[in-house]
Image: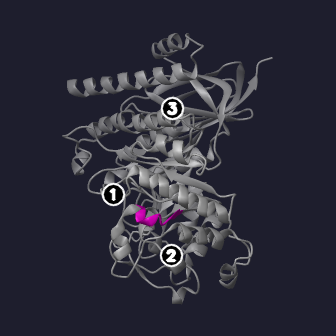
Amino acid sequence: MDRRRFLRSGASLAATALAESSSRAEHPESPEWADDLVAAAGSAIRVVRIDPAPRFDFSPLFYMQFMEPLGTTDASVEAAWDYWRDDWREDFVTATRMLAPDVIRYGGLLSRYYKWREGIGPPDRRPWMRNYVWGGKETNRVGTHEFVELCRRVGAQPMYCVNFLSDGESAYARAPEGNRSGNADEAAEWVSYCNDPDHPLRRANGAPEPLNVRLWQIGNETSYGGDTFPRDEAIGQTIQFARAMRARDPSIQLIGWGDDGWAGELVRRAGQDIDWVAVHMMQQRPLRRDTVLDSLAYQRQPERAWEELMEILPARVERKLLAVEAQLAAQGAEHPIAVTEGHLSLAPHNANPILTEWLTGVYHARVMNLYHRHGARVRMCTGADFNGMRWTTNAVMHEMPRGRSYLLPVAAVTALFKRHQGRQAVAVSAAPAELDIAASRTGDILYLHVANTDYMRSLEVELQVKGMTLRAGRVLEMAPDDMRASATAVTPEPFVPQEHALAAGDARWRVPPRSVSVVVVEMHEVR
């Protein structure tokens, strides 16, 4: 227990330092913030203080999901298609509507050998393709039209990741099935097929109106692996692709690859040709060599697993995000960041069962809160892969055969935050170190996203908003008693939030340990 107390106190100190740095950045003109924090920590009722002045507007594309056919590794797209009805599974569409993504991206590593023309036309004439990365074959039953239709049904913007000369992997140009690499002309033709009002082939394939695909990512993980493009060649090719694609439709938004320290040079050379900079947050790994997270050892030591999860965020995710922001700022670039992939990466690869359990719920909330606080620059983000029937890094899982689809903890948290978020960010000027909070507003409605990082203790909290009186509100709370509570086909909804009312004029509530909450309060300016 002495060791556990030491580890918890260390995590608390790290959280306090993070809160202090965030508060200084948000309120350099208010030195009294530190006194507020100390006073709040020393009282029985902890105080959360909000400065309601809008800081920035949130992007309407903030919450995204990432879909990729995964072959024999995880049926993913194939598992979401109902071949009896020859349509998307109804339970999958329902679960996706609950998740309510703003954007769904299609491609990933598949884009290195994907030929978009194989996914159009009569389905019974579409050729099968080998899934070179994930094994097996793909039917191409889901192609351009089917993917765009899914996005329309769930209210999401479609995004395609184009075949960017196979991200530089020249072997795909000499594949057994022929040249699987794609050039700038091929990408430009795809833009025309989707968006040209009079494209004859699209009209012949049953879509007289444009598909209006506005978001396109040029390549995927171009800097990952020794066989991909070096930076300068990648940037040069990005410019060629961007110009060819935009010549077909000047209104499209283009996303270039800026990971691994490429962001600064990318915007310096290609800033006029692209609109966004993409990075992937795959660095979400344990810090300790003797980790219990990369095995089933966490099941015997859940408190130790919790301590490790609380260590990852500032050391890996936030550090990388700050570095990318600094590279863009050094170039004077205003390009937004799109985190187009990223998830908690544990062994066994993409299949660790802890990701189905509430032990990871607060971790996912903290990641989304981090992106929320950096929303002036992070304009699109995800915390998971999208869907499938095996990977625990998914947001939506499918019971097979057919059956039901359900949300894993990362999706339950994301859906809660998405449905209760304001249009403008506001600052948290003081808060207990145990609480990770992101705040926003729409008019007179204030929203708090709250994650209690304390494993053992609840906190009594009072909300105060500068210059405002508070009226009635409510708390929507995910706080399972069992940290091992798991989302499965048998228990598909273990994380349904419980709602509690806040009385008018009394914005106090108890934050349970290991919980994720949303607080919604009506506020009125003091006159």
- What residue type is disc 3 on? Ala
Looking at the rendered structure, the secondary structure element under dot 2 is strand
Residue 124 placement, left or right of 252: left
Looking at the rendered structure, the secondary structure element under dot 1 is loop
Q: Which mark is residue 81?
A: 2
Q: Nearer the viewer, residue 49 or 492?
A: 49
Crowd tier of the residue under label 3, counting other residues whose Cα lies within 10 Å: few below 14, some 14–19, many 20 or above: few
Distance from the alpha carbon under mark 3 to that under mark 1: 36 Å
Q: Residue at x 37, y 68 (%)?
A: 74
Q: Which mark is residue 350?
A: 1
Check contact, mark 3 vs mark 2: CB within 8 A.
no
Write the start and end of the magenta stretch as one range.
161-167
Q: Earlier in the sequence, mark 2 or mark 1?
A: 2
Q: Residue at x 42, y 55 (%)?
A: 233
Distance from the alpha carbon under mark 3 to that under mark 2: 46 Å
Q: Residue 176: where, in percent of width, then height?
A: 33, 81
Q: Which mark is residue 180?
A: none
Residue that mark 3 sits on: 330
Check contact, mark 2 vs mark 1: CB within 8 A.
no
Q: Nearer the viewer, residue 20 or 198?
A: 198
Q: Residue 340: where, in percent of width, then height?
A: 49, 52
Distance from the alpha carbon under mark 2 to that under mark 1: 22 Å
- What residue type is disc 1 on? Asn
Q: Which quadrant would residue 117 be assigned to in this image?
A: bottom right
